Amino acid sequence: MLAIILSGGSGTRLWPLSREAYPKQFIPVVSDQSLLSETISRGLRLGADTRVMAITNEEHRFVVAANLQQLAADRTAGIILEPVGRNTAPAIALAALAAAEENPDELMLVMPSDQVLKDEQVFARAVAAGADAAREGKLVTFGIVPSSPHTGYGYIRAGGSQGAWSNVDAFVEKPDADTAQRYLDEGGYYWNSGMFLFSASRYLEELERFQPGILKACQAAYKGRKGDMDFTRVDKEAFAACPDDSIDYAVMEHTKDAVVVPLDAGWSDVGSWSTLWEIQPQDENGNACHGDVILEDVSGSYVHSEGRLIAALGVSDHVIVETDDVVLVADRNRVQDVKKIVNRLKEQGRPEYKLHRKVHRPWGTYEGVAQGERFQVKRITVNPGASLSLQKHHHRSEHWVVVTGTALVNRGEEELLLTEDESTYIPLGVTHRLTNPGVIPLELIEVQTGSYLGEDDIVRFEDTYNRV
């Protein structure tokens, strides 16, 4: 079996913890593992012969690659990069084309990278049942047994039972409250999990039958692919011409071979702060807390601290989330509207909609410490053996002070080796590169001074990671 992990979402509904450049699938929002890591591990635990393939985008590629390298180094089937977002039907088509090259009958278990499943034994049994159906040529979806009349999910209406699975009668849009309650009362309705299981060949056959334009564009894009380190880059122009459509609309709603396997395994798509409140342990007053929190006369609230103490008094049904650069305070029944805040930040050109204060790069991280007129201070961490690009700046100079580890600095024609408590200066316009030649992380403090301090003031000459 091939576990296909879809990891292209922006995760704005869990802002400010989740942001466009580092969305919720990369963050440990429920346990001490990120949702992506949990999804990879979930796929690997299905069997020793299960391999993992990821579909992601340009911006997130190195984070996905690092997770796969850490958890599935010898069982990775590749990483395909989408040059533009075109929804799930084309993304899965690229994976199916890659899988079919080796084995057209290979089973593909499609999983979003940002979901929670508490009972993995139940999940494994459901996958085994789905695999039996998929070997018979069925296109399997997993229907979550509903625990409430939820209006935030699409529903699947099941038809005649075939033992461990049922035929799909219909996919139903997100209902209003009364309709959702009717679904719950009648039975035979499931939440649409967004997880699927089928063979590569069957998916491509049905895609050709119902959406030949998507298949044709994906075939052209995949034919023009190029290898880049651990990544497969498909042809951008061909993929950009592909229709934007979900697998539900493109295939599953039309095929006569759709079946649903019920799944009751503590599933959640962690789609909002209120959903996270629902699935987290709560105290006697119905509060779910994370981090350094003190509450007095507070009920029904989700309070999340990333660092600073949060003290709350006399509030009910609130969501309070603290990060190192943002504090969100919201009515728990209004958290679906957090995207309105994100949109306002975009309109104002503020970086908080996209970036955390700590920014992840393929070589490590940098974190803003202080900023003022014509200066800013950053804490930079370079992973062992990693190197920044050979670059220069037109508008700023830089001062580096090594805190821990060893720094190899190329500055013009010079090469310097710096250890703890040593420093150097990079004048404006001088070509330079920073490398960690050691076996422990390199940490340094960078002080930038100049007339313009934006991240786009970088002219790269050589880059290990093929960035522009």
Image (cartoon, grey):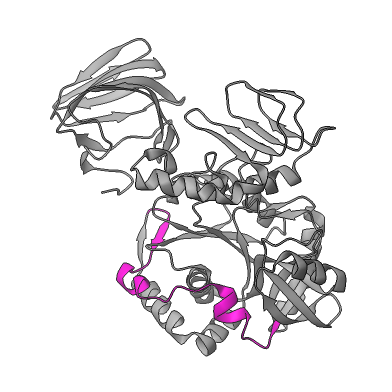
Residue at the extreme top of the image, as rendered: 421
| Image quarter of the N terminus | bottom right
Please say whether residue 338 is one of the residues in the magenta stretch: no
Q: Nearer the viewer, residue 437 or 402?
A: 402
Residue 126 relative to residue 85: left or right? right
Q: Quadrant of residue 206?
A: bottom right
Q: Quadrant of residue 29?
A: top right
The answer, for residue 447, to whether it is visible in the render is yes
Picture coordinates of residue 284, whole percent (x, y)? 85, 32
The answer, for residue 28, to whether it is visible in the render is no
Please say whether residue 250 is one of the residues in the magenta stretch: yes
Q: Nearer the viewer, residue 87 or 33?
A: 87
Position above or below: 302 against 160: above
Position above or below: 194 against 198: above
Q: Quadrant of residue 459?
A: top left
Q: Residue at x 78, y 62 (%)?
A: 149
Picture coordinates of residue 277, whole percent (x, y)? 71, 42
Residue 70 relative to residue 463: left or right? right
Picture coordinates of residue 7, whole percent (x, y)? 52, 56
Position above or below: 281 against 171: above
Picture coordinates of residue 236, whole percent (x, y)? 32, 67
Q: Total of numbered circles in the picture? A: 0
Q: Residue at x 63, y 53 (%)?
A: 271
Q: Which residues are magenta?
A: 229-258
